[in-house]
Amino acid sequence: MLAHTLLVLTALVLAHGAPQERGDTDASSQLLQLKALVEELKNTTQDQADELKMVKDRLAIAEKDLKEMKDVPKIAFSASLGGDGLFEAGSSYKTIIYKNVITNIGEAYDDKTGKFTVPVRGVYYVRMTANGPTEKTISSVLYKGQQIILIVHEQPSGEGSDTASNGATFLLEKGDQLHVKLWPNTHIWDNSGRFSTITAFLLYPMPA
């Protein structure tokens, strides 16, 4: 509608010609007004076009951000040792299998093997908590493959029980496997209160 109005007004201006050619003061005044109106409408049309482009650009950015959010993998798990009592290692290392799965978004944790398999390269946060009677050493040792990357440890301290915890962020590669072991002659304890746990989740993916 605005473009049609602008076209009509432009035609009127061209039909009247320049004021000197008509010799009519009133017509000249009207012609000047028409010219001014045409310029104003041109400016309005350009402003609206600029505003429409800006809105389209913002919409494109919002759609891109939304797609990126949807494409980010959702990886998070928490599990506790489960059972009701001590889990002990003898004279050798013993793998801890956290059987009571609290959350396992992305299904990257296997409660049959106790292994967390990294599904996508990225920065992950991992935290472990270990509880046990204090007459014996408490330990939980996190491995990436065969490499120790995090340790929870508490020396004997007399009667009672104690809890130790540790956590860190790690850059992990797709296919890396994390698992937890007890050191020899150490133990942890758990019941339905979930005293001995592990948690890991993806903070953000990283390009290869």
Image: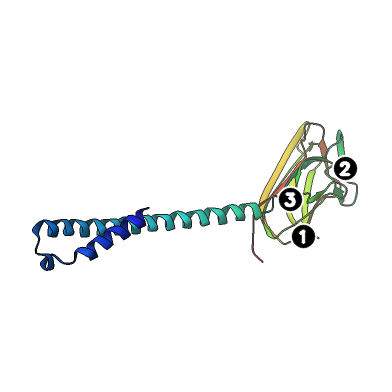
Q: Position of residue 122 (x, y in %)?
A: 67, 58
Rate crowding at label 3 as few (under 14), some (14 to 19) or many (20 or more) other CA atoms within 10 Å.
many
Quadrant assignment for the C terminus: bottom right
Image position of 142 with respect to 20: above or below: above
**What amino acid type is highlighted by mark number 3?**
Ile
Q: Is 172 on the left-hand or right-hand side of 115?
A: left
Residue type for callout 1 = Asp
Marks 3 and 1 sit apart, C-alpha to C-alpha, by 18 Å
Answer left or right for 121 relative to 81.
left
**Comes first in the chain, label 3 or label 2:** 2
Residue 151 has which mark? 3
- Dot 1 and dot 2 residues touching (CB under 8 Å): no
Q: Secondary structure at mark 3?
A: strand
- Image position, residue 157 (x, y; %): 75, 37
Q: Is residue 188 above or below residue 39?
A: above
- Check disc 1 and report the residue beneath it: 176
Q: Earlier in the sequence, mark 3 or mark 1?
A: 3
Q: Secondary structure at mark 1?
A: loop
